Image (cartoon, grey):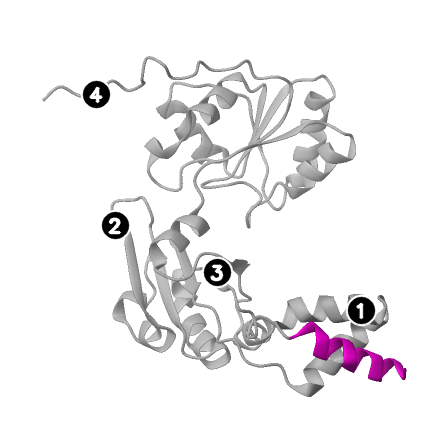
Amino acid sequence: MSEAPLFAPTAPPPRPVSGGFYLVATPIGNLRDITLRALDVLAAADLVLAEDTRVTAKLLTAYGLKAKLERCDDHTSQRAAEVAMQYLREDKVVALVSDAGTPMVSDPGFVVARAAIAEDIKVHPIPGPSSALAALCVAGLPADRFTFAGFLPPKSAARKTALEALRTSLHTLIFFESGPRLQDSLKDMAEVLGDRPAAVARELTKLYEECVRGSLSELANDPRCDAPKGEIVVVVGPGAETAASETDIDAALAEALTRLPPGEAASEVSKALNLPRKMLYKRALDLKGH
């Protein structure tokens, strides 16, 4: 069987890459996941800011590209911003990449983007791979509303405090975690959030790709979650919706009434708590002393 052509004859041709700052998503494992537009930008870049220049050099080499590389990690982002701004002020093409996935998502580079925005320089997203979204897709949990919470604190006490702030969220939660801390994090999640359905996704798009699903307590005791290797994303299902108490209603109305007249305050709280506006309007008038 003959192979299909790599590109359809009607595929849109590449457009010229104009000067500006480009946030370029790169593969999270499988190098074939890079987009054509990302390759266009990297080929045209006068400067590429990279979290680890050795990792980015391998990616460029795989596609026969060469570029001037500047390190941009947590320790060098300020210097990288200064170098990048010199190029950008001359209307040159500067690209920012992370080691894997979409830049700015739990990755350095925020300082550079802020500097570019402050000088009204065009900032362009070049979308592509994201381990958080890839894990959400395969977790088998609600994906209509989700909260990305990044890395939790390494110490249990601080981690539980951070989880407590997310306990009442009705969104699916997405976390990054390291292998050695995974089991302890899952135990703390089960204790603070409740034994919700969850999934642990590991090494997505790579040879040993794996997604383990179950309750948080089951995952915490699963041998596959005992210090696994590779990049790890934990996806936790949303909490159960509970009816608001009278105290919650009054607190929400009292806060809204500091900003809004009774009618508008009732409408805002009605949407937030999914309660009848008419009842809330009457209560808002009572609180105002009308």
Helix, strand or loop at mark 1:
helix
Single out the mark in the foreground, 3 or 1: 1
> Quick one: label 3, few (<14), some, or many (20+) residues within 10 Å?
some
Helix, strand or loop at mark 2:
loop
Which numbered disc, 2 or 3, marks the residue that appears first in the sequence? 3
**Corner quadrant of residue 7:** top left
Query: Residue 4 has which mark?
Result: 4
Range shown magenta: 276-290
* Residues under numbered marks 1 and 2 in contact, where contact means CB atoms less than 8 Å apart: no
Q: Amino acid at mark 3?
A: Phe
How many discs appear? 4
Report, in whole angstroms, how far the alpha carbon at label 1 lies from the one at label 2.
Answer: 57 Å
* Residues under numbered marks 2 and 4 in contact, where contact means CB atoms less than 8 Å apart: no
> Quick one: label 4, few (<14), some, or many (20+) residues within 10 Å?
few
- Residue 197 visible in this rendered orientation of the protein: yes
Query: Residue 208 has which mark?
Result: 2
Query: Residue 175 has which mark?
Result: 3
Say above or below: 120 vs 275.
above
Single out the mark in the foreground, 1 or 4: 1
The secondary structure making up most of the magenta span is: helix
Single out the mark in the foreground, 2 or 3: 3
Helix, strand or loop at mark 4:
loop
Query: Residue 263 has which mark?
Result: 1
